[in-house]
Image: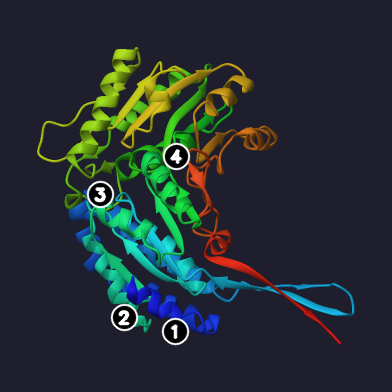
Amino acid sequence: MQAAQAVHDSGALSDLRPVERARMIQKMAAYISTNKDRVAPLLTLESGKPLWEAEIEVDSAARFLEFYGNQAESLEGRSIPLGASYFDFTTFEPYGVSGQIIPWNFPLEITARGIGPALATGNAVVVKTPEIDPLSHFIFGEAAEAAGFPAGAINILCGHGSEAGAALTAHPDVSQIVFTGSVATGTAVAVAAARRVVPCVLELGGKSAGIVYPDADPQQVLDSIRWGVYFNAGQVCSAFSRMVVHESIHDEMVERVADMAKGLSVGPGLERPTFGANMGAMVSEGQRDRAEAICQRAEADGARAVTGGRKLNQPGYFLEPTVFDGVTETMNIAQEEVFGPVLSVMKFSSDEEALRIANGTEYGLVAGVFTRDLERATAAAQKLRAGQIYVNEWFAGGVETPFGGFGKSGYGREKGREALYNYVQIKNIGIALG
């Protein structure tokens, strides 16, 4: 913390021209890309994801830094007309030290997503790595040094959330907090921030629904479920957790989705180096067992496991790719975030019912609409209570698009140009002339 605060106080980062910060961030991106073959296998070993998924994550981390390097010069104040007797304008100033607590599901990507806009706007950062998979974070230290950042601009802190994370959020030198994780921990972070009147960005859980209308393209739905449910073994805040499908195509879609899930090869990540019909392990035994327990409760509540729902009888933290049918709105599995490779299928008969089901949780991170009717898609998108709506492709968008939730999914926006405003304060300067 002393190093981060010293760099801020000295102006070694914030006083630079934006283009100078931009060039360093771009160099970090290039360094990470160049070293992908060193980083991706380590990420696979400590997180369990297939090697090809780890490579995608490294690429994504580099892309976030590339994007925010490009954005560093884009923030501009404005002149406010107050008549001939005054000159009034606004400027943006960095908060100082941004404390960022990183989750274990996409440790590299989410770190880059946070430090990119923080550095672009002139803040120093202290990153608390996830205790489950911290090792691959070495690349950020190497990249920062290679890019020429002043010592203290980027600081990597390892430790448990209850100790290191709590100390970070309570530290008097932290001027802004970024947290991605569970609602319970996010609430604790928000309370700690409120005690010190420090702003924070919270990206929390989700229980996202995709509405599948009768005229939907079945292949678009299947492809979206492949990525939205089984990528990273379902350990994704914005996962396609619930398929809300019209009753006229329900049976067909359940059969096709179950066949796809059954066709996934599940096993060690290093043995799955290339994209295909495969899935890796969950990150830990505790996470796997929690997901399995939710599946068991779903069956007890009356849902039908079309496929999966059990851990594999082999070494490793593997859960079968799972599809539940007959899920009702009040079931626990329709409300609680599983954070595993589990899809819940729910039927609807009218557009109003579909929207009620989709909006029927405390979360509001993302949602999806599958239809060939653009008017219907637009109408549904306007009524869905979520921060991002995907139409005909789950995860449509990229680093350029703002991301964040409604309700218990948090507040503030990550990604896109919008994220820059989390890291700056607006100052107004009014000058009386004459």
Q: Is residue 234 above or below residue 157?
A: above
- Label 1 or label 4, whichever comes before in sequence order: 1
* Disc 2 from disc 3: Cα separation: 28 Å
* Disc 2 from disc 4: Cα separation: 39 Å
Residue at 33 percent across and 70 percent down: it is 1
Q: Is residue 303 above or below residue 216?
A: above
Q: Secondary structure at mark 2?
A: helix
Name the amino acid, label 2: Glu
Q: Are marks 2 and 1 in contact (CB under 8 Å)?
A: no
Residue behind mark 4: 224
Residue at 37 percent across and 81 percent down: it is 147
Residue behind mark 1: 10
Label for residue 417? none
Residue behind mark 3: 49
* Disc 3 from disc 4: Cα separation: 19 Å
Q: Secondary structure at mark 3?
A: loop
Q: Quadrant of residue 171?
A: bottom left
Name the amino acid, label 3: Lys
Between tags 3 and 4, which lies in front? 3
Name the amino acid, label 4: Ser
Q: Residues within 10 Å of mark 3 (few under 14, many from 20)?
A: many
Q: Are marks 2 and 4 in contact (CB under 8 Å)?
A: no
Give the percent coordinates (x, y) of residue 318: 19, 37
Q: Is residue 34 left or right of residue 178?
A: left
- Label 2 or label 3, whichever comes before in sequence order: 3
Q: Quadrant of residue 5?
A: bottom left
**373, 424: nearer the viewer:** 424
Label for residue 145? 2
Give the percent coordinates (x, y) of residue 78: 73, 72
Q: Secondary structure at mark 1?
A: helix
